[in-house]
Amino acid sequence: MARLTYAKAGVNIDAADRFIRMIRPLVRSTERPEVLGTIGGFSGLFRPRARGMKKPVLVSSTDGVGTKLMIAEMLGRYDTVGVDLVAMCVDDVVVLGAEPLFFLDYIAVGKVRPRMLYEIIRGIVRGCRQARCTLIGGETAELPGLYASDK
């Protein structure tokens, strides 16, 4: 039986690593003092400040951009979907009276296209800066065969 590798499955680890190196300065621009560690893993560490709080509660939200991604694809412009994504999650947090502290992203594609993904992250970073929250991590999943990779 042939040995299965990421490369044989259509996953380009080198492109993913190149993408992480590209976005590292963007992501660092959102850091707050509570952030522990750096991007590149699948999770992030955040030590909340609880001083002055009697019963602190962390509030979290997740959302997706839905069909807005189709419009971004038609326009060839991807930086706006990231801002929108952060805004939807932040809105769900602040409506409960909570402060947005950090954000985790999840991006699934058929093929890692570093330039396109960079634009998405650039939008997420812009949204995080506007919300004064930090992008502490996430995942970029390359899923050939599940998502189209012809672009």
Image (cartoon, rainbow, N blue to C red):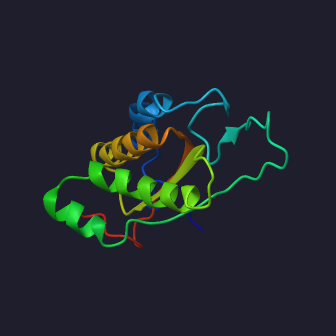
Image quadrant where residue 122 sits? top left
Image quadrant where residue 41 sits? top right
Residue 47 percent coordinates (x, y):
74, 36
- For this view, does 126 lie left or right of residue 135? left
Q: Is residue 11 visible?
A: no
Q: Is residue 12 above or below residue 37?
A: below
Residue at image location 55% in from the left, 61% down from the top: 95
**What is the count of numbered marks?**
0
Q: Is residue 132 above or below residue 86?
A: above
Image quadrant where residue 142 sits? bottom left
Residue 89 percent coordinates (x, y):
50, 59
Question: Please, which residue is most extreme toward the right here?
Answer: 54
Quarter of the C terminus within the rendering: bottom left
Q: Nearer the viewer, residue 45 or 61?
A: 61
Q: Is residue 82 visible?
A: yes
Residue 3 percent coordinates (x, y):
58, 60
Residue at image location 67% in from the left, 56% down from the top: 59
- For this view, does 113 lie left or right of residue 30? left
Residue at image location 29% in from the left, 67% down from the top: 68
Residue 124 percent coordinates (x, y):
40, 46
Quarter of the N terminus within the rendering: bottom right
